[in-house]
Image: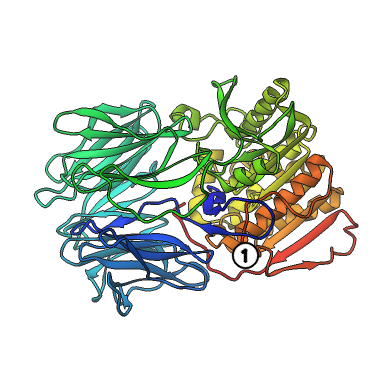
């Protein structure tokens, strides 16, 4: 469950009036037949909407204008623009219109509403789409705008990951460690191959078919012997792997248009590198990019590569190695203030890497906020983060810890849960805090925690396990009771819990209890701000309410903030409302002085609009504050 705090990009300044915008960390999709025509998702008055971009005229056109925004967009070979028209609860249908504009049309007729689980288009107006619900995933196929037929339906969550240019073969991805990690189907529904992940071969991912007409070859990545190895499947040769091309940390890859080379993006130690792999020559060459993080990268026509680059001090910027004009990324001019550096802290399974940001003009130890990433299979990057910007501008040190279980440090680090789920990560947070206080960088009496999703879970757990170390906590959309969350969350996240804990709550109840924040709630001493969502399917609201009730019973000073949304969001108002509330809360608790104007980057929208304050329930005393925020917008449903 990755957090979403990077969804808001702020503009320079301070105070509570000014400007902000949302952005999606992805490159424009490019028309295969005309690379000057593109589709991207950008800001439209604080919402994500789909736009076209003409690289010849350098003009953008807004395609969608929905009250709650539009996240998913694409473009096919005939330059038709696609987007997912979802309803309030995240279900909907694919639609399209011509690049120049025109009436909206259904992508395929006869397809029921559902969650988007992949869209793929062949060269001859053949379209395949994955549509899912809580129980299953179906793949539908048909001519663009025509009648669909169901090709297959599988239990659980799966994603359509590719179609051959001639539309004859489809690839469907399941859980990477499952017996059906990758399934190759004929357009008629016949199964050509089922490729297993997990033991003994290692987890397996499908990354799409080669974009050439003379053969069908599906790109694969296998986790093997603590490395990530490129491979492929074809009807003639079956599965083969390139042992000469292996990487020690996580990668993703895309085909170049020639079908004989690949662009590989590697995440390593909080930063990114690009490599071009020549399959026939069996060579790997670096693609030069600035030091930092590549949020996205894609090969284009000929040697051209598009990439979206950032570092902690610099908001995201699009670039083309061939100088192709790309959509502008309106954002902050200049650099984010402060000093940004790395920290490595000794640990039982190897050094723990943290990204440290310090306020300008620091003298001695300062109050610090530990931003705890979600996942757990994710990591903090040397990348712009609006929360980091706001906190550093407000005078805090910010520490982003890539604890054991994080990606970007190899399979062994990702599997390191020696002290138990959550408890291992809490141990790493405590170790980094001790390192920084010993160095005189962070005040021992002014260290707070802030996390979203699984990061919010770690905040709650740390406050209960190590109550003497932390002086404040902010938990956004957290897991608060592991067993209760398991019983009411999505099927995909139940499967994740079973892998992490080694079974269900009925099979290993002691493990769930030992790792549950609710088990330690009576020990919490630090004031706490909890922001939760009323329609959260991943971290359900019921278990959060139970935790808040337990805090009240234990007499712990706390505040709560309820958003009328789901778990994933892309409307800026909600992000900014939580950001402002959290910065004011941390400023009060860690620096001991009341403030009404946090040093957040400027915004020209009132992020607190729609918020209604209610009296605390009877019996809560003066130490509990509850806030509700009504948004009513549909949340983006990302692959879990």
Q: Secondary structure at mark 1?
A: loop
74 w.r.t. 592: above or below? below
Q: Quadrant of residue 327?
A: bottom left
Task: Work out which residue is located at the far bottom of the displayed protein and give it.
Answer: 103
Residue 181 % position (x, y)? 34, 45
Q: Is residue 3 left or right of residue 230?
A: right
- Is residue 152 visible to the viewer in this orientation of the structure? no
Label 1: which residue?
605
Q: Is residue 486 rendered to the left or right of residue 143?
A: right
Q: Can residue 46 be seen in this snapshot?
A: yes
Residue 513 at x, y percent in the picture: 68, 42
Figure quadrant of residue 191: bottom left
Which sits in the foreground, 106 or 340?
A: 340
Q: Residue at x 60, y 19 (%)?
A: 346
How far across and how far down the image is residue 293, in percent? 44, 38
Of residues 586 and 615, the one drawn nearer to the viewer in this rendering: 586
């Amino acid at each position: 469950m990755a957090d979403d705090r990077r969804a808001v990009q702020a503009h320079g300044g301070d105070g509570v009036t000014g400007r902000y915008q949302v952005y999606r960390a992805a490159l424009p999709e490019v028309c295969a037949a005309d690379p000057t025509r593109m589709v991207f998702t950008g800001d439209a008055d604080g919402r994500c909407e789909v736009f076209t971009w003409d690289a010849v005229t350098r003009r953008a056109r807004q395609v969608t204008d929905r009250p709650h925004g539009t996240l998913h967009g694409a473009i096919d070979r005939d330059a038709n623009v696609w987007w997912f028209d979802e309803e309030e609860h995240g279900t909907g249908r694919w639609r399209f219109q011509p690049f120049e504009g025109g009436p909206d049309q259904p992508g395929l007729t006869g397809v029921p509403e559902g969650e988007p689980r992949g869209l793929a288009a062949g060269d001859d107006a053949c379209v395949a789409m994955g549509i899912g619900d809580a129980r299953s995933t179906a793949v539908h196929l048909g001519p663009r705008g025509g009648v669909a037929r169901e090709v297959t339906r599988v239990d659980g969550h799966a994603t359509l990951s590719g179609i051959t240019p001639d539309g004859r073969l489809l690839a469907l991805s399941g859980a990477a460690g499952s017996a059906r990690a990758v399934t190759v189907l004929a357009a008629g529904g016949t199964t050509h191959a089922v490729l297993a992940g997990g033991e003994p071969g290692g987890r397996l991912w499908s990354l799409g078919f080669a974009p050439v007409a003379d053969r069908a070859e599906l790109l694969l990545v296998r986790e093997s012997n603590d490395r990530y190895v490129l491979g492929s499947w074809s009807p003639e040769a079956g599965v083969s792997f390139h042992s000469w091309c292996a990487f020690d940390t996580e990668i993703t890859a895309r085909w170049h248009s020639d079908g004989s080379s690949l662009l590989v993006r590697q995440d390593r130690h909080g930063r990114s590198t690009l490599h071009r792999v020549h399959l026939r020559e069996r060579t790997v060459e670096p693609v030069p990019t600035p030091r930092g993080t590549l949020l996205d990268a894609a090969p284009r026509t000929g040697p051209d590569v598009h990439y979206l680059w950032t570092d902690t001090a610099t908001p995201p910027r699009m670039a083309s190695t061939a100088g192709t004009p790309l959509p502008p990324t309106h954002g902050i001019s200049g650099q984010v203030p402060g000093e940004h550096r790395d920290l490595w802290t000794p640990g039982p399974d190897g050094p723990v890497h943290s990204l440290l940001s310090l306020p300008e003009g620091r003298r001695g130890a300062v109050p610090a906020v530990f931003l705890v990433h979600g996942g757990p299979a994710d990591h903090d990057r040397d990348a712009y983060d609006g929360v980091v910007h706001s906190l550093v501008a407000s005078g805090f040190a910010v520490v982003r810890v890539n604890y054991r279980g994080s990606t970007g440090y190899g399979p062994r680090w990702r599997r390191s849960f020696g002290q138990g789920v959550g408890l291992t990560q809490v141990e790493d947070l405590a170790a980094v805090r001790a390192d920084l206080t010993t160095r005189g960088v962070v005040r021992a009496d002014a260290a707070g925690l802030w996390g979203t999703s699984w990061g919010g879970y770690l905040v709650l757990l740390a406050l209960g396990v190590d109550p003497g170390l932390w002086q404040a906590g902010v938990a956004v959309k957290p897991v608060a009771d592991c067993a209760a969350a398991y019983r009411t969350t999505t099927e995909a996240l139940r499967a994740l819990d079973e892998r992490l804990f080694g079974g269900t709550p009925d099979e290993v109840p002691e493990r769930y209890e030992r790792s549950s924040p609710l088990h330690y709630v009576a020990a919490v001493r630090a004031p706490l701000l909890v922001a939760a969502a009323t329609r959260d399917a991943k971290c359900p609201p019921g278990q959060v309410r139970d935790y808040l009730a337990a805090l009240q019973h234990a007499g712990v000073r706390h505040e709560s903030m309820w958003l009328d949304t789901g778990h994933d969001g892309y409307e800026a108002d909600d992000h900014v409302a939580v950001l402002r509330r959290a910065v004011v809360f941390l400023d009060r608790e860690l620096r001991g002085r009341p403030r009404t104007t946090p040093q957040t980057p400027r915004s020209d929208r009132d992020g607190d609009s729609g918020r209604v304050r209610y009296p605390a329930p009877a019996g809560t005393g003066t130490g509990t504050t509850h806030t509700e925020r009504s948004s009513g917008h549909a949340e983006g449903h990302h692959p879990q």
